[in-house]
Amino acid sequence: MLRESKYGSVSLFWNGLLISMFEKEKEENFMEEGEYLIRQTKGVSIKEQILTYKLYCDVIYKKKKEKNRITYDDHYIFRKCLFALMRLGIVENNEHNGYFCMSKRKSQRKHLPEE
């Protein structure tokens, strides 16, 4: 299902596959979400965090590839993990992994001339 707000939408990709879409808010800094997750796992080594985030993203990727159900919470955690990996510099925002922001689609309706 495509989610779109009046500001557009954001698509999340992992290994070249569209995993999730969510509504874009007016001013949103996605890296803050990753930073928040990193701060919440304080006390866990960075190496272990990276392995955990990658593993979670791979599990969601497999679920999506096999067309299994992905819950709202799965999408939410995937989003946090992806941005944490980007914040740590492990994943770059490119055509295979990362996010893509789209502005709101304009209506394709054409007004018919009045007779």
Image (tube, rainbow, N blue to C red):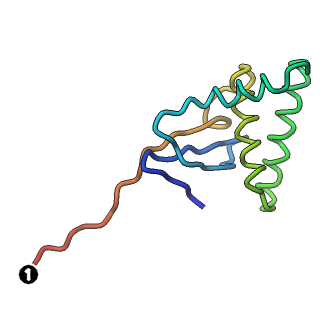
Q: Say left or right for 43 vs 72.
A: right
Residue ID at (18%, 73%): 112
**Image quarter of residue 50:** top right
Residue at the extreme bottom: 115
Residue 53 percent across, percent down from the top left: 83, 33
Question: Residue flagged by tag 1: what amino acid is it?
Answer: Glu
Residue ID at (59%, 45%): 11
Say what secondary structure mark 1 lies in.
loop
Residue 41 percent across, percent down from the top left: 85, 26
**Image quarter of residue 88:** top right
Residue ID at (11%, 77%): 114
Q: Indicate whether 56 appears above or below 37.
A: below
Q: Indicate whether 89 appears above or below 104.
A: above
**Image quarter of residue 39:** top right
Reading the image, the residue beneath label 1 is 115
Q: Say left or right for 107 vs 39.
A: left
Residue 59 percent across, percent down from the top left: 85, 46
Image quadrant holding the N terminus, namely bottom right
Towards the viewer: 66 or 87? 87
Q: How many marks?
A: 1
Number of residues whose C-alpha sits closer than 10 Å to that of mark 1, classed few (under 14), some (14–19) or many (20 or more): few
Residue ID at (8%, 81%): 115
